[in-house]
Image (cartoon, grey):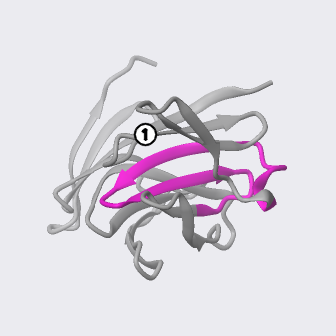
Amino acid sequence: QKYLRSVCVDSRGKVWCGVGTQAHLVVFDPATGTKKEVLPEQYATDSMVYDLTVVGDYVVASIRFSGDVLVYDAATCEVVRTIPKPDKQKCWALADGGSGHTAYLWTVPSQDAYRCDLRDGSLTCLVERFGQVKVVEDDRWLHAIEDQSYVVYDLQAKRVVTDHRLTAG
């Protein structure tokens, strides 16, 4: 079976659709009604394109269960960089809020947060064992889920500034 797992819209208005339970990445052009498969053949046996995010002129996709992140040039729909899954981790997950050439990733299962320069794939660890980073704001504030809590980490102060349990139990 095929399920739509993720979606994003690039700066040219094309809709990128991540599919699972058999991995596909389809780019749909609403202006022409055309669609194109852009996932490299080597990922065809993976389970899904789990996360998608737009960062400047790039589209970034996390692949389960290979664990890799693929960086696409949105104009050509071609992979320009592959970021292999981190050592001793299952995969990367993506956070929203990147800009220019900067994306934000976190590891599964350790939940270590990273800044990634998409031009060369270089990674900088921001904080270890923090939680599921969902959004990075202004290259400073990491908004995350940690179990039952909403947590905010200040990258400048290098500390948690908000930790609110939002559910009972």
Left or right: residue 62 compared with residue 155: right
Picture residue at 50% right of the left edge, 62% below the top: 72
Q: Residue at x 46, y 19 (%)?
A: 169
In this rendering, the answer to whether 39 lies above or below 169 is: below
Instruction: Give amino acid for label 1.
Output: Cys
* Residue 125 at x, y percent in the picture: 41, 73
Q: Is residue 30 above or below residue 82?
A: above
Instruction: Look at the numbered disc 1 and give the secondary structure of its residue.
Output: strand
- The residue under the point 57% across, 62% down is 70
Q: Seen in the image, is 84 located left or right of residue 134?
A: right
Q: Is residue 45 magenta?
A: yes
Q: How many marks?
A: 1
Instruction: Indicate the quadrant where residue 34 lies.
Output: top right
Instruction: Confirm whether the magenta stretch covers residue 62.
Output: yes
Q: Nearer the viewer, residue 142 or 129?
A: 142
Residue 131 visible to an observer of this rendering: no
**Residue at mark 1:** 8
On the image, which quarter does residue 43 sit in?
bottom right
Q: Nearer the viewer, residue 97 or 36?
A: 36
Q: Quadrant of the N terminus?
A: top right
Q: Which residues are magenta?
A: 42-69
Q: Where is residue 131 shown, x and y percent of the image? A: 43, 49
Is residue 159 placed above or below 47 in the rendered structure? below
* Relative image position of residue 134 (x, y in whole percent): 37, 44
Is residue 71 in sight in this rendering? yes
